[in-house]
Amino acid sequence: MDKMVEIARFHFPADAQTLVALLRSEGIDCYIRNEITAQVLSYIDTGGARVEILESDVPHALEIMKAGGYEIPDESELPEQVKAVAGWTRHIPFLKNLSLEKQILFFFILIAVCIGLLIYFGSLSSLN
């Protein structure tokens, strides 16, 4: 049994509907995940409307998307936010050899410790 995979993500659901209409016209079953959420909460970044299809239809769908003028992202390409974190860790010698997940976890723990110390020392100064 094939699983559903995301092939595109749009901030506006109307853009996702255009792609879905194109894919359905070529006989590919697809649907839009988070369509209502993206419409109602358009002022908040909820991840957008996601076009999903069966995994077995991906190669054919990508061909249709290329022919339709859609930009196909390179799978090795990292999102901008991930590139920013990876750029910061490049300057820390013991972090640059870790996987990106571990680098992000390290930063999360570091920030949590700093906030904890601020709260602790802030409460000490308020007691005096």
Image (cartoon, rainbow, N blue to C red):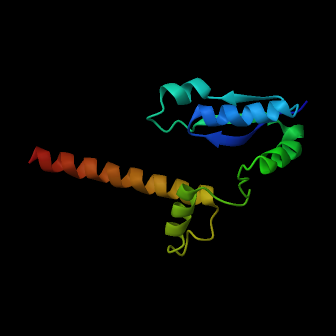
Residue 4 visible in the shown view: no
**Residue at left offset 56%, top offset 60%:** 103
**Residue at left offset 33%, top offset 50%:** 115
Image-quadrant location for residue 102: bottom right
Image-quadrant location for residue 101: bottom right
Q: In this rendered view, identify the residue nearer to me: 118 or 48.
A: 48
Residue 97 percent location from the top left of the image:
63, 70
Image-quadrant location for residue 79: bottom right
Q: In this rendered view, identify the residue nearer to me: 104 or 77.
A: 77
User: Does 75 sit left or right of 35 as displayed?
Assistant: right
Residue 45 percent location from the top left of the image:
49, 39
Query: Quick one: which residue is furthest to the left in this view?
Result: 128
**Residue at left offset 82%, top offset 47%:** 62
Q: Does residue 4 sit above or below 60 in this rendering?
A: above
User: Does 66 sit left or right of 39 as displayed?
Assistant: right
Residue 31 visible in the shown view: yes
Residue 92 percent location from the top left of the image:
50, 73
The N terminus: image quadrant:
top right
* Total marks placed: 0
Residue 111 percent location from the top left of the image:
40, 54
User: Does 65 sit left or right of 47 as displayed?
Assistant: right
**Residue at left offset 54%, top offset 76%:** 93
Q: In this rendered view, identify the residue nearer to me: 24 or 112.
A: 24
User: Does 83 sit left or right of 8 as displayed?
Assistant: left
